[in-house]
Amino acid sequence: MTSKRNKFLSGFTIIELAIVLMVIGIITGAIFKGQDLLEAAKIRAVLNDFNRIKIAVTHYQETFGSLPGDDSHASNHFGSSIANGNGNGLIEPPEELIFWQHLYKAGLLNSEKPPTSKLGGRYSIVHNPSDKLFGHWIQLGKDSGTTANGGLLTPKQALMLKSKADGNSSISQVLEGSIKVVEGAGISKGQCVQGDQLNLAVDAPVCIVLTSLE
């Protein structure tokens, strides 16, 4: 009788342990799923930021006939305390800083400071950022002074951003699609980009991303 009772108790303990392990597995899965959802939400927020900035620039151009930051008549629109650009059609230093001020004064953004992203870092405006990227670009990177060009995203995050923007889950070529990817300032070559592909083996914040403002 004692032997049978011990077997019963032992079997019951194993069942309890199995239930506990199952519950732990469910909770762990839910945590990972929650993290994935949170990451996806941050990616969507960045894409929304890109679109919001582009729309604001379009409205500014339609209203004032100039690019924000480059507008040589901004002080006429918004008051003598507002800096003017040189009106040459390019947003170049130091105009990339007053770019945000012009948009703010026009009521198109809610702050005159460069906006930050849900993934960290901040946005900046750059002109001809590389020998393969011409024109004006919205750049997202780690804040490193005037231009936010420090490594901010992992290659996998950059891929998620590119995939979400263009609806192509395999778009790993860095200069394909609407989102371009380059190495952050000071990052060793090959950490973010190998050839024309994202280096998905690296799990460190080595990439910055850009989308055309044009």
Image (cartoon, rainbow, N blue to C red):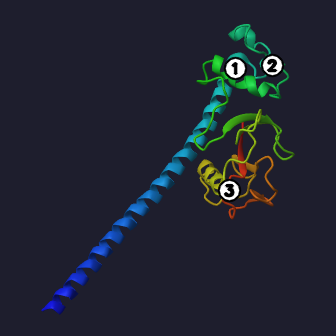
Quarter containing the C terminus:
top right
Residue farthest to the left?
A: 1
Q: Going by the image, does 184 lie left or right of 30?
A: right
**x, y percent for residue 4:** 17, 90
Sooner in the amino-acid sequence: mark 2 or mark 1:
2
Instruction: Please provide percent x and percent y for residue 177.
Output: 69, 50
The mark that comes first in sequence, 1 or 3, is 1
Q: Identify whether 98 is placed above or below 39.
A: above
Q: Are marks 2 and 1 in contact (CB under 8 Å)?
A: yes
Q: Does residue 163 lie above or below 65 as drawn?
A: below
* Pick the front one: 197 or 21: 21
In contact (CB < 8 Å): disc 2 and disc 3:
no
Q: Residue furthest front?
A: 2
Residue 29's quadrant in the figure? bottom left
Report how far apart the C-alphas of labels 2 and 3 lie in the structure: 38 Å
Residue plotted at (74% across, 22% down)? 98
Q: Amino acid at mark 3?
A: Ala
In the image, what residue type sits under mark 2? Gly
User: The residue tagged with tag 2: helix, strand or loop?
Assistant: loop
- Which residue is at 53% across, 50% downward? 40
**Residue 141 seen anywhere in this rendered image of the structure:** no
The residue carrying mark 2 is 85
Look at label 1 and name its amino acid.
His
Q: Which residue is mark 1?
A: 102
Q: Residues at badges 1 and 3 in contact (C-beta under 8 Å)?
A: no
